[in-house]
Image: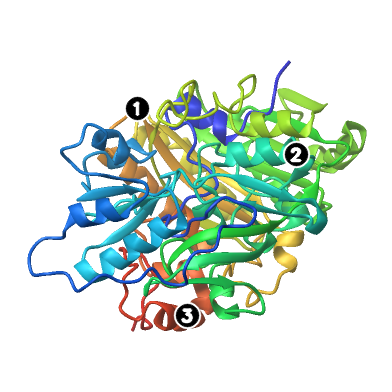
Amino acid sequence: MERLLDRRQFLRRTGALCASVSASALLGVTAGCSRPAPTPATVPPTSAAPPGPPNWSDLAQRLTGSLVLPQDSAFATAKLLYNERFDGVVTPAAVAQCASVSDVQRCVDFARRSGVSIAALSGGHSYGGYSLCEGLVVDVGALSSISLHRHTSGATVGAGSLLIDVYDTLGNEGVLLPAGSCPTVGIAGLTLGGGIGVFDRLYGLTCDNLRSLQIVTADGSTMTADPSEHADLFWACQGGGGGNFGIVTSFDFAVHPIPANLSLFTLDWPWSAAAEVLGAWQGWLPTLPDELWSNCELSSGPPGDLVRVSGVFVGNPGTLDSLLAPFLSAAGSQPSGHFVGSESYLAAMFVEAGCAGKTASQCHLPTQTADGTLPRAAYAAKSTYVIDAFGSPALAATVEAVASAQQVAPGFGLALLFDAYGGAINRVPTSSTAFVHRDALAGIQMIASWGSGAEPADASAWLDQAASALAPYTTGAYQNYIDPTLADWQRAYYGANLPRLVEVKRAVDPDDLFHFAQSIPTTLPA
């Protein structure tokens, strides 16, 4: 039986298994117990560092986890990101594999005293490679326990938790957290930048389901932020992007009962129908109930050009058929492939993850679990938003951007992936959280994938060309598809919320300890 085939399958076909929803720099991360053991508000600082290089031996002795240095045999694996594009680009001085919240505090204290840069690593999916730095990388992969609190309809999820483990653990308890799809994305970066997924139109973004968090700030303090305590910091962590305000050590989320009925659909058309299908799909989106999420994929590359509309519906296949009927009528031609069927929640999430038929343990990289089967990938991406449905010029430009892809970058996997917004996402006022993109009809991810290694010039050229073609008809960019080449990225990611984010940054990190190429600044750009 045909199953839902969307961006996960596209990326697997073309060599980038899972460049999907999520993944800005991971300097926000969580511990994983339902009630964390008490830790001091601040790890007592040691005496000022003497002149000379950082005393890595001293840090190693203070950690309950491990400090991995370049001369250690484990270093080659410890410094890897998910995206092979960044292999060898940045070599850290050390990787701290933290085993506790106190380890995170000690790392922050050490970085501040020693004057070394700091970055956090969990899933390692940062589109800009910002999970690494040349100084101290704080690996929180071991902080990965997940606990359900039935009496509060909530869950505490550790920063080292990967999405497939979140889905599997909570799903087996009968609840879900709306989040992304890529199985090895870390929950922290995903949440801090927003979090787009198949249940977001019904339940809101991942960051909209955040109830509180524990965070280690630049002075080494650990604080709890929620809507009433440190409310500005909590607001900033709801979409302000990972890597900006500290290292989160615990998230508390609202969770939702698993729906009784769930249906999937996949519709394929020949490439000649691309403009009509995309136009009909965009026109259809405002009519959808919150229970229905959909995406539209226009892709080029082996095994050929593709037009595909897929989706997930909280309801039965019969109702889904009736909701699809107006779209199919407006598309102007019948699909060449048509699948509508029911599925259980966990099976659907494993399909979305590209892990149908695998166990949760197998749905990892070999470096993450002993029986992990997923490969790393090499890809680059850009993003933008559709506010109003495309007219004829925009549709023509979009289709031409994909149709010409193989002329610009022959042999690569190239795609425009449109995700439906609206519903619960757009009912949140733009100023209520740091995530500002609340008026979008759809988000667009422009993605180029290749076999392995550094980004080829041809792939960069196509991404630039596609972004230029769409620019007159779109606006903004998604901070979790963080783009090192993006001009005016501050306003593209954060829009009218940028000034308040700068204020929060200045308050909690005045010396800009948590800094990378696209981190929130302490002053507004000119």
What residue is pinned by disc 2? 312
Q: Is residue 347 visible?
A: yes
Whether 305 is drawn above or below 187: the answer is above
Report the residue at 69% width, 74% height from top.
Answer: 429
* Residue sitting nearer the eye, 79 or 219: 219
Which colouring convention does the figure follow? Answer: rainbow
Q: Is residue 239 visible?
A: no
Residue farthest along the left direction in this orientation: 52
Report the residue at 51% width, 51% height from top.
Answer: 159
* Residue sitting nearer the eye, 486 or 174: 174
Residue 513 on image: x %, y %: 31, 71
Spatial CA distance of label 1 from label 2 is 30 Å
What residue is pinned by disc 1? 451
Residue 311 on image: x %, y %: 72, 38
Going by the numbered disc 2, the residue's amino acid type is Val
Going by the numbered disc 3, the residue's amino acid type is Val
Describe the element under mark 3 as helix, strand or loop. Answer: helix
Q: Tell me the mark number nearer the camera, choosing from 3 and 1.
A: 3
- Quadrant where the N terminus sits is top right
Q: Mark 3 or mark 2: which comes first in sequence?
A: 2
Describe the element under mark 2 as helix, strand or loop. Answer: strand
Q: Which mark is residue 504?
A: 3
